[in-house]
Image (cartoon, rainbow, N blue to C red):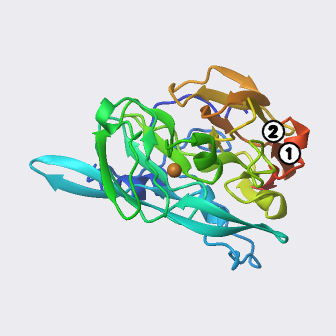
Amino acid sequence: MSSVFSQRPFKGWSRRQFLGWGAAGVGLVATSTAVGSRLSAQAPARIPPLPVDYRPPSQLPFDPMAVLRDFDYGTLKRENGRTVREFEVTATSTPLQLNSALSFVSWNLNGRVPGPTLRARAGEWVRVIFHNQDGHSHSLHFHGIHPAEMDGVQPVRHDQTRVYEFEASPFGVHPYHCHIAPVTRHISKGLYGLFIVDPPQPRPAADELVLVMGGYDLKGEDRNSIYAFNGIPNYYRDHPIAIYQNQRVRVYLLNMIEFDAAITFHIHANLFRLYRTGRTLTPSEESDVVTMGTAERHILEFAYPYPGQYMFHPHQDAIAENGCMGLFDVLPS
Ligand SMILES: [Cu+2]
């Protein structure tokens, strides 16, 4: 593990980071630097291909396998001598087939639960154009630092648009969610997502994954009936997430489960390094379990030295057994 995590100055970009930020005109050239170990922290991360027999689920409005590594960098615009990173987010209602027997009308953002993983760099000016095409009033409330009028607690009514603008600050991992009362209901219906603010000096290359834990209150009884990573219960149990042996994996992890006071997250047969709220460039601790209240989020990094399949789940096993269960499929490098 030490070679995987050897701390060295950043020298290059992952292909995806490069593509994602390429539109920003940063003018950097992706480079690869050997670090004299079996894997390089600077080489672009390799993303395993999907199994040849994998098909995106036809009964769902989105593919949870795509949500894992889908980062929305928005559109860059030049306005009056400054650069604006602009996102479009639309609220709507969509039935979600949570399992073979269970269809649930979600309130969602851009047709998916969680909503799009918005990504900017610290200090950039961000504009989020929020369209509410749902029948209920909603809003987008971002965590992070911004003025009161951009705090997203005022309702945006059906068929209206609200523009939120602020500086992406501070770097870290921040949730966003609807803040219309009852907030528990609006969140547990699916109106939440992640806003990643990258540090000025990018983190080392890694296979980056988004995992958002959510719960569904199907009966309106202020308790969760079923849980999920990235919207669909047990999806990654039934479709394990392929990662490569000995390659650094970086998980952007968010707990958006309402009604349960705290949730743990646990990985099997390994330890992760924890960057609390994504606010540091060096890890604060190592563990195989972390406890998170609602809206807590962290960056976790790890590399698996042995191939095989490994569970990840909350260690409240009743929650794990009720939909919040996944597998990493570690492929030989
Ligand atoms: Cu709402």
The relative height of residue 170 versus residue 214 in the rendered view (above or below) is: above
Q: Along the horizontal axis of the image, is 317 left or right of 305? A: right
Of residue 100 and residue 276, the one placed in the foreground of this image is 100
Which residue is painted at 75% across and 50% down in the image? 245
User: Residue 234 location, x and y as percent?
Assistant: 81, 58
In the rendered image, residue 94, in percent from the top left (x then y), is placed at 60, 69
The kind of residue tagged 1 is Ala
| SS at mark 1 in the image | helix
At 74% from the left and 59% from the top, the residue drawn is: 242
Which residue, given by chain and number where applicable, does mark 1 sit on? 320
* Proximity of marks 1 and 2: CB atoms separated by less than 8 Å: yes
Residue type of the residue flagged with mark 2: Pro
The disc label shown at residue 39, or none? none
The numbered mark at residue 314 is 2
**Residue 319 percent across, percent down from the top left:** 85, 43
Circle 2 packing at 10 Å, graded few (<14), some (14-19), many (20+), is many
- The residue nearer to you, when weighing 36 against 151, is 151
Viewer-side residue, 120 vs 187: 187
Q: Quadrant of the C terminus?
A: bottom right
Q: What crowding class fits label 1: few (fewer than 14 Cα within 10 Å), some (14-19), or many (20 or more)?
A: many
Relative horizontal placement of residue 175, taking residue 239 as reference (left or right): left
